[in-house]
């Protein structure tokens, strides 16, 4: 079989970004799984896929966040505007990027209600049914990480929501990004995380992931939390 043509995972188009990541934005939990048209295309072309961290790095570079234009300052709002302009009306894994990606703005007390409304709007687009689970990608400011009974609790700067990650995911992230991990809690360092999140069957509970791996163990931890709460 011919290897075909390999296409880039992340491309900039006139309409916005076109990205293919190594994550699933929709996972069926029951029924037969059919092969996508893209994978069975007769022309034999194939496309690379990028990890979540690669996506974050690429949009930061393409938005020029690694360059300084000589201005006196550049705040978070300017950075967000550049990234949003880059994303445009593009697509991620074939889905409209505006539906599956949330670039969270900087937290300000006066804008707390707006931040909450925007995040809730994003979560309403992540639907979970007995048949399938949908996921979305959120980019936010990392605040803290604390151990919990079922893994770890993650807090971000923009909301007071509680997020969860499994022990396996946190261990993998700490090994992969040792330097960034070593300065968590430092007053001079700022971290941004990109995570994949979903709603569990328990209303209002969100399970984020720091990377695109360890799905099964993370979901098992989520189900264990829900079961423990029902039994208590």
Image (cartoon, helix red, strand yellow):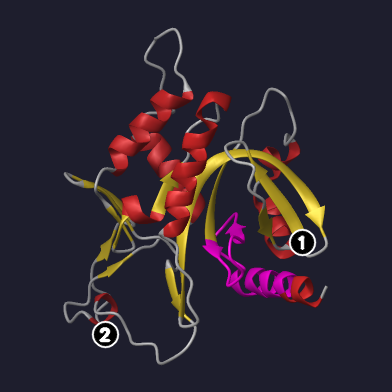
Q: Please indicate whether residue 49 sits to the left or right of residue 37 in the image.
A: right
- For this rendering, which residue is in front, 189 or 138? 138
Magenta residues, as a range?
198-226
Tell me if residue 181 comes above or below residue 2 in the rendering. Answer: above
- Residue 151 tag number: 1
- Quarter of the picture containing the C terminus is bottom right
The image shows residue 22 at horizontal and vertical percentages of 44, 64
Q: Is residue 213 magenta?
A: yes
- Quarter of the picture containing the N terminus is bottom left
Q: How many marks?
A: 2
Q: CA distance from mark 2 to mark 1?
A: 45 Å
Q: Residue at x 64, y 42 (%)?
A: 160
The image shows residue 141 at horizontal and vertical percentages of 58, 37
Q: Would you identify the image quadrant in which residue 187 lies?
A: top right
Tell me if residue 82 comes above or below residue 72 in the rendering. Answer: below
User: What is the secondary structure assignment of the residue under circle 1?
Assistant: strand
- The answer to whether residue 116 of the structure is visible from this angle is yes
On the image, numbered disc 2 is attached to which residue?
1
Q: Residue at x 26, y 50 (%)?
A: 90
Q: Is residue 118 magenta?
A: no
Disc 2 versus disc 1: nearer the observer: 1
The image shows residue 4 at horizontal and vertical percentages of 23, 73
The image shows residue 218 at horizontal and vertical percentages of 65, 68
Q: Residues within 10 Å of mark 1 (few under 14, many from 20)?
A: some
Q: Please indicate whether residue 89 sits to the left or right of residue 22 in the image.
A: left
> Which residue is at the far bottom?
32
Quick one: label 2 or label 1, which is nearer the N terminus?
2
Q: Residue at x 32, y 85 (%)?
A: 35
């Amino acid at each position: 079989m011919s290897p075909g043509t390999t296409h880039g995972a992340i491309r900039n188009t006139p309409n916005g970004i076109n990205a293919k990541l190594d994550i699933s934005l929709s996972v069926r939990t029951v029924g037969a799984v059919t092969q996508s048209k893209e994978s069975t295309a007769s022309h034999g072309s194939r496309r690379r896929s990028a990890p979540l961290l690669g996506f974050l790095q690429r949009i930061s570079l393409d938005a020029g966040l690694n360059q300084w234009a000589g201005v006196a300052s550049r705040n978070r709002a300017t950075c967000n505007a550049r990234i949003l302009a880059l994303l445009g009306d593009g697509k991620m894994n074939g889905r409209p990027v505006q539906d599956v990606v949330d670039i969270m703005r900087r937290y300000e007390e006066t804008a707390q209600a707006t931040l909450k409304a925007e995040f809730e709007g994003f979560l309403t687009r992540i639907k979970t049914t007995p048949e399938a689970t949908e996921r979305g990608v959120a980019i936010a400011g990392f605040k803290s990480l604390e151990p919990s009974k079922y893994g770890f609790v993650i807090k971000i700067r923009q909301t007071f929501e509680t997020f969860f990650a499994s022990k396996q995911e946190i261990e993998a992230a700490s090994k992969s990004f040792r330097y960034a991990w070593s300065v968590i809690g430092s007053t001079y360092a700022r971290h941004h995380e990109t995570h994949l999140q979903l709603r569990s069957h328990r209303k209002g509970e969100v399970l984020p992931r720091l990377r695109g791996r360890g799905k099964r163990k993370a979901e098992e931890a989520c189900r264990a939390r829900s079961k423990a709460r029902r039994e208590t």
